[in-house]
Image: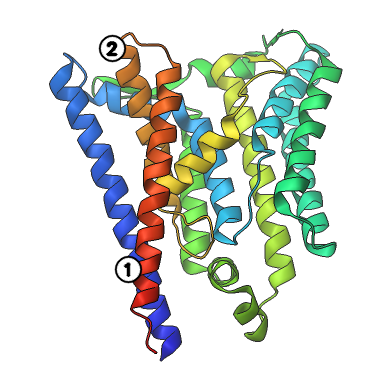
C-alpha cells in the first residue's frame, strides 16, 4: 500500500511540475505575442525547434541521468568534440557515412566509461563527469584551436533542407530531435528499463531489494547521455556547418536547467522528457524575446538562472509538502 501511495504522490508531483512548466511556456509565448508584431506566428513557433533541436537532444540525455539522482556536466564538451572531430575528418576526405557513426560511438563509449567508473568505484558523478568535460574539451583544442568550416555536400543538404508547414518551415535536422524525444518517452514510459530508471532515482536501496539491475541501469544512463550529446554535436554541425573548440561553453547548465524547469527533480525519481522539451522551448522563447527587445544576449542566461532558482524552490516546496503528508 505504501508503495502505491508513493507512486501516486510522485505522479502527482510530476504532473504539477509539468503543468507549471507548460503554463509558463504559453504565458511567455503569449506575452511575446502581445508585445511584438509578428511574434505570434507558426514560423516563430517552429523556429523554437529549428534553433534548439540540439539543446533538446542534450537535455533529453541528461534527463536520464538526473532521474537516477546523478549528474553529467561533460555533455557540452562531448558536443564540441563531436563538431571539431567531425569537421576535421570531413576536411581529410572521410565520408559522412563513416564520420557520423564514429562520433556517435565515441560519445556512447565516453559516457559508458564514465558510468562504469562512477558505479564500479563509487565515485562522485560530478567529479568524474568534470574530468570527462576537461578530457573532451582538451581534445578539441588538440585537434584545432581554430574554427574548421564544413563544406561536405551531405552536411550542406542537412543544413539547408527543410519541410514547409504553412508559412513556417522545419529543417530536416529537427527530426533527429523529435525521434530521440519519442524514443526516450517510450523507453521511460513503457519499458522495464525506464521503470528501473525511476525506481533507482526514487530509492536505490529499494531498487536493490526489488532485484533490479541497479549497476547496469546507472551505467546505461551515462552511456545514453553521452550518445545524445554526440548526436546533438552532429545536429549542431548541420546547424552551423563548422567545428570550433570553444563552441557551447556552459551548455551543460542549459541542458540541466531545461530538465529542472521541466519538472525533473535533482534528487531523482521524478521527471519526464516532455517536461524537459518544454524547458528547452522556454529558453528558446526567452532568447527570442531578448532578440526582439534588442537586449544583450546574456539577459537570457540571467533570466534562466532566476527561473532555475524559482523552480528548485517550487520543487523543494512540493517535496516538503509530500513528506508532511506521510503517515506516522
In the figure, is residue 268 to the left or right of 104?
left
Q: Which mark is residue 293?
A: 2
Quadrant where the N terminus sits is bottom left
Q: Residues within 10 Å of mark 2 (few under 14, many from 20)?
A: few
Q: Which residue is mark 1?
A: 12
Structure colour scheme:
rainbow
Name the residue located 23 percent from the left edge and 30 percent from the top edge. Answer: 29
Looking at the image, residue 34 sits to the left or right of residue 261; the answer is left
Q: Is residue 158 above or below residue 327?
A: above
Q: Quadrant of the C terminus?
A: bottom left
Residue furthest to the left: 34
Horizontally, is 230 left or right of 256 in the view? right
* Residue 189 image position (x, y, % from top left): 46, 65
Which is nearer the eye, 271 or 239? 271
Residue 262 makes an appearance in the image: no
Local packing at callout 1 (Cα closer than 10 Å; few below 14, some 14-19, many 20+) is some
* SS under mark 1: helix
Please report the residue visible at 81 percent of the width from the left and 50 percent of the height from the top. 113
Between discs 1 and 2, the one toward the N terminus: 1
Return the x and y of residue 316 as percentages of the image width and height. 41, 58
Q: x and y percent of residue 73 in the render? A: 66, 41
Distance in Å between CA atoms under marks 1 and 2? 37 Å
Amino acid at each position: 500500500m505504501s508503495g502505491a501511495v508513493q507512486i501516486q504522490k510522485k505522479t502527482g508531483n510530476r504532473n504539477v511540475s509539468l503543468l507549471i512548466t507548460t503554463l509558463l511556456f504559453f504565458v511567455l509565448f503569449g506575452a511575446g505575442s502581445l508585445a511584438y508584431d509578428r511574434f505570434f506566428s507558426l514560423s516563430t513557433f517552429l523556429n523554437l525547434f529549428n534553433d534548439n533541436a540540439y539543446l533538446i537532444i542534450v537535455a533529453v540525455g541528461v534527463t536520464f541521468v538526473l532521474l537516477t539522482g546523478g549528474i553529467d556536466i561533460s555533455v557540452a564538451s562531448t558536443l564540441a568534440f563531436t563538431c571539431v572531430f567531425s569537421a576535421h575528418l570531413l576536411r581529410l576526405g572521410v565520408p559522412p557515412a563513416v564520420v557520423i557513426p564514429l562520433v556517435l560511438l565515441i560519445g556512447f563509449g565516453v559516457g559508458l566509461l564514465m558510468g562504469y567508473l562512477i558505479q564500479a568505484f563509487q565515485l562522485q558523478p560530478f567529479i568524474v563527469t568534470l574530468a570527462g568535460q576537461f578530457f573532451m574539451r582538451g581534445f578539441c583544442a588538440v585537434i584545432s584551436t581554430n574554427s574548421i568550416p564544413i563544406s561536405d555536400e551531405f552536411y550542406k543538404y542537412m543544413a539547408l533542407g527543410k519541410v514547409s508547414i504553412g508559412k513556417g518551415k522545419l529543417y530536416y535536422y529537427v527530426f533527429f530531435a523529435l525521434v530521440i524525444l519519442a524514443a526516450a518517452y517510450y523507453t521511460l514510459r513503457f519499458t522495464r528499463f525506464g521503470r528501473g530508471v525511476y525506481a533507482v532515482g526514487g530509492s536505490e536501496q529499494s531498487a536493490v531489494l526489488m532485484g533490479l539491475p541497479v549497476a547496469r541501469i546507472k551505467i546505461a544512463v551515462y552511456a545514453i547521455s553521452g550518445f545524445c550529446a554526440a548526436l546533438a554535436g552532429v545536429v549542431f554541425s548541420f546547424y552551423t556547418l563548422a567545428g570550433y573548440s570553444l563552441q557551447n561553453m556552459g551548455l551543460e547548465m542549459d541542458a540541466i536547467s531545461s530538465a529542472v524547469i521541466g519538472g525533473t527533480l535533482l534528487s531523482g525519481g521524478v521527471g519526464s522528457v516532455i517536461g524537459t522539451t518544454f524547458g528547452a522551448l522556454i529558453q528558446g522563447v526567452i532568447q527570442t524575446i531578448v532578440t526582439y527587445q534588442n537586449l544583450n544576449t546574456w539577459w537570457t542566461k540571467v533570466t534562466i538562472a532566476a527561473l532555475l532558482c524559482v523552480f528548485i524552490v517550487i520543487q523543494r516546496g512540493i517535496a516538503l509538502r509530500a513528506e508532511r503528508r506521510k503517515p506516522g
